[in-house]
Amino acid sequence: METAVKKRTYKKLGFTSLEMVEIVQPINILLANYHIHYQKMRSFHWNVKGRDFFELHDKFEDFYNDAKLNIDVLAERIRVFGQTPASTLSEYLDMAEIKEVGTELRSDQMVDETISDMQSLLSMMVDVTDAAINMGDVGTENMMNAMIQKMEKMHWMLTAWSNTEKPVFS
């Protein structure tokens, strides 16, 4: 008589390896883009000039500090799934939609770049949220909802400050 052996599938947090890839891949893409955005905000903080210097110098510092925190949260979420986050500059540059810019931008160009980055990051956050919802990953979904709410407010305030009407999603 043969005994039926039930094949076991490894599941981390209740997710299969394939399901984890579906969640981790868009998080890694968001992580890479956040790193480029973070470096742009540091550059803008260091290099802003003109009548808006004091205001924008402080605001760009707020933005890079927020980005730094989100980078850590995203990388740690990837580790929760037992995966390794993208961690090298070359990986970030290869994966990122957000691009580097030079250091000789006017303050209004820096603000426009920041608004554009925020729009890109928001779109990627929605991609991560959609993947989390599709997999029933409530932890990642909640994490993204908090990031989205904060980013939407920063986007609104920066567009109000710059007096531009740029839709969050186009």
Image (spheres, rainbow, N blue to C red):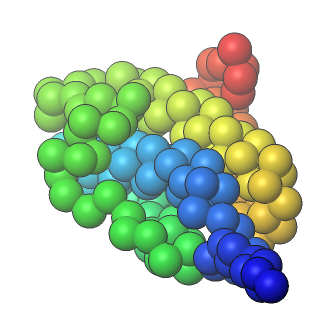
Residue in the image at 80% along x and 85% along y = 1
In this view, which residue lies farthest toward the front? 1
Please determine whether, in this image, residue 61 is positioned above or below residue 103: below
Residue drawn where x is 83% and y is 52% of the image: 133
Q: How many labels were placed on the picture?
A: 0
> How far across and down, in percent of the image, does residue 131 sit?
72, 47
**39 vs 56, nearest the viewer:** 39
Where's residue 64, x and y in %? 40, 59
Q: Is residue 88 visible?
A: yes
Q: Nearer the viewer, residue 57 or 2?
A: 2
In the picture, the quarter occupied by the C terminus is top right
Residue 102: x, y in percent? 16, 29
Q: Considering only vertical position in the picture, is 110 above or below 1?
A: above
Residue pictured at 39% horizontal, 29% vertical: 97
Viewer can see residue 153: no
- 2 relative position to 57: left or right: right
When asked about the image quadrant of residue 20, the answer is: bottom right
Q: Position of residue 158 (x, y in %)?
A: 60, 38
In the rendered view, tell whether residue 58 sits above or below residue 114.
below
Is residue 37 left or right of 88 when viewed as pictured? right
- Work out whether residue 118 or residue 48 is closer to the camera in this orientation and state it: 118
Q: Nearer the viewer, residue 86 or 121?
A: 86
Tell me: 31 left or right of 169.
left
Is residue 2 shown left or right of residue 75? Answer: right
